[in-house]
Image (tube, helix red, strand yellow):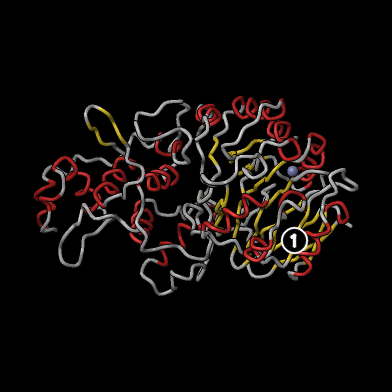
Amino acid sequence: MRIKKLALFLAAVMTLVSLSVSVSAYDNMFSDVPEDAWEAPYVYDLVGRGILSGYGDGTFGPRVTVKRCEYAKMLVGISQTPLSNSLTTPYADVPSWEWYFPYVNSSTSFMTGFTEDGVLYFRPEWDATREDVTVALIKALNIDLSPYTDPTGYLSQKFSDVDSIAAHNRVYIAAAVDKGYITGDVNGTFRGQDPIIRAEIVAVLCRAFPADTNDSTNTAVNDTLTAFFLDVGQGDACFLELPGGKTMLIDAGTAQAEQTILSLLQSRGHSHIDYVIATHPHADHIGAMAQILQQVSASVVYMPDAQTNTKTFETLLQTILDKNLPVVKAAAGVTIDDIPGCSAVFLSPSETTPEDLNDQSAVLRLSYGQIDFLFAGDAEAGAEAVMCSTGLPLSADILKVGHHGSDTSLTPAFLAGVSPSCGIISCGADNSYGHPAQQTLDALSAAGAQIWRTDQNGTITVTTDGNTFACQAER
Ligand SMILES: [Zn+2]
C-alpha cells in the first residue's frame, strides 16, 4: 500500500459537513422498499431530507446490517455534530485514509470504543448492535437521564432479556424506550446484542430526529437536476444544480477555466458549492479549483488518495487547508448520502486499480429517479476493467466519457456495462492529443449513444426531472 501522506495531510483539515433539511415525496424510489412496507415512510423521509441514500443501483437494502462506521456517519450527520481538526484519533483501528475517519473521529462524544490490553479500538467494520445504537443515540441527543432512577426495574416490565443488556447501558435504553425511539420484539425481548438493520435504523433516527416542519426549506424544493458540462477547452469541468438546491462541481478545468466557471456560478446565482470533486490531480481537472475555492465557499471536497508534486496540486491542498474544508476520500463504494432524492456512489478507484493518476480518477455514478449519470474522469482501460469486475452497477443514461474521448478509455466491456444513450466528451478544439479518438466516436455511435462534444457544441446542459432528460448545446 502506498504511503498515505496526502490522507494524513487532509485529516488535518476536516471539519463539519453540515446537512440542510428539505423534503419531498420519493415514493417507489427503491425497488426493495415497496410503498406498503412498514419502513417506507421512514426511508423516504430520511432520503428526502438528504440524511441517507440508497446504494445507487435502485435498492436501499432494508435488511442489510449497519456497520459501526456507517452509524457514526449517520449520527454525526443527523445530529449536526461539529468535527474537530485533530490529526489524531483515539482509536488504534481508525486509519486516517479511510473514508470514515472524519465521521468516527467526531463521534467520540456519543460512541464508545473497546479497550483491549490498554489499547482503544473503534471496531469500524463490526455490525452496530441495537444496544450500541441506542446508547449512542441518547448520548447524541443529550437526553436528561435523571428521571430514570431505576432503569433495570423499568426495563424488566417491558423485556424478558434485561440481563443481556450491560448494566451501565440500561439507563440509556430505558430513556430511548420511554421516549418511543426504539421498541422491543413482539415476543417481549430487546435483543440488545442483535445487529441493527437499515430498516430499523431509519425508523429510530426518524423518531429521534423528526423533520422540522417549521423549516421553510421543507416546502419549496426544486426538483430539477441540471448539469452543465462546461466548455473549458482541453480539460473537464461539470457543475450540477441538484434537486433540493445543493450544488456540485466535478473538476475545474485548467487555470484558464476560472472565468468560465465563475461566470456560470454568478449567472446562476451561486456563491456556494456543496460538493467539490477533484477527480484526480492533473492540471486539466484541478487547474482552476484553488482559484474557485478562494472565491466561493464550499462544504466538502472529495478526492481520491492520489497525489502529485505539482505546484497546481500543492496550491489546491494549501487552499483546502486555508479554507479549513473537510475532505473525504473518494473510493469505490463511498457514497454521498446527503443529496435529497439522489443516490451517489463512487465506482473507482479500488485497491486493485492501477496506480497511474488517470486510472486513479474518482468515478461517480449519480442517480436521480430513473436517470443515471456516470462521470468517468480520466479513467482508462485499467480502471474500467476493475470497475467492470466489482459488481457495482455501471449503467448510465448520460456518460461523461473518460479521458476526453481518448482511445485509452471506453473499452467494449465498459461501454457495454454503462450502455449510455448520451455520451459527453469534454475536449479542446484541435487539441494536440487528438482527442477524441475516432474509435471512441465509432464505438459510441455503434452503441446507439448520441454524442455531444464541448469542442463542437460548447457548453452542454442536461436537465432532468428524474423521469426523462434533455440535452441542450450552446452551439
Ligand atoms: Zn484530463
- In this rendering, the count of numbered labels is 1
Please identify the quarter of the rendering in which residue 202 is found: bottom left
The amino acid type of the residue labelled 1 equals: Gly
Q: In x, y percent, where is residue 420?
A: 69, 65
Q: Is residue 99 left or right of residue 431?
A: left
Q: Nearer the viewer, residue 287 or 472?
A: 287
Residue at 16% across, 60% down: 189
Disc 1 is placed on an element classified as strand
> Quick one: which residue is furthest to the bottom in this view?
36
Q: In x, y percent, where is residue 257?
A: 80, 39
Q: Is residue 294 above or below residue 67?
A: above
Residue at 46% across, 25% down: 87
Q: Is residue 316 above or below residue 278?
A: above
Q: Nearer the viewer, residue 51 or 406?
A: 406
Residue neighbourhood size for the residue with mark 1, other residues' Cα within 10 Å, grouped as few (<14), some (14–19), many (≥20): many
Residue at 48% across, 59% down: 54
Residue at 65% across, 27% down: 319
Is the C terminus in the top left, top right, bottom left or bottom right quadrant?
A: bottom right
Q: In x, y percent, where is residue 124?
A: 36, 42
Q: Is residue 431 left or right of residue 57?
A: right
Is the residue marked 1 within 8 Å of ligand 1, measured from its CB? no
Label 1 belongs to which residue? Answer: 423
Q: Is residue 31 above or below residue 455?
A: below
Q: Quadrant of ligand 1?
A: top right
Q: In x, y percent, where is residue 81?
A: 43, 38
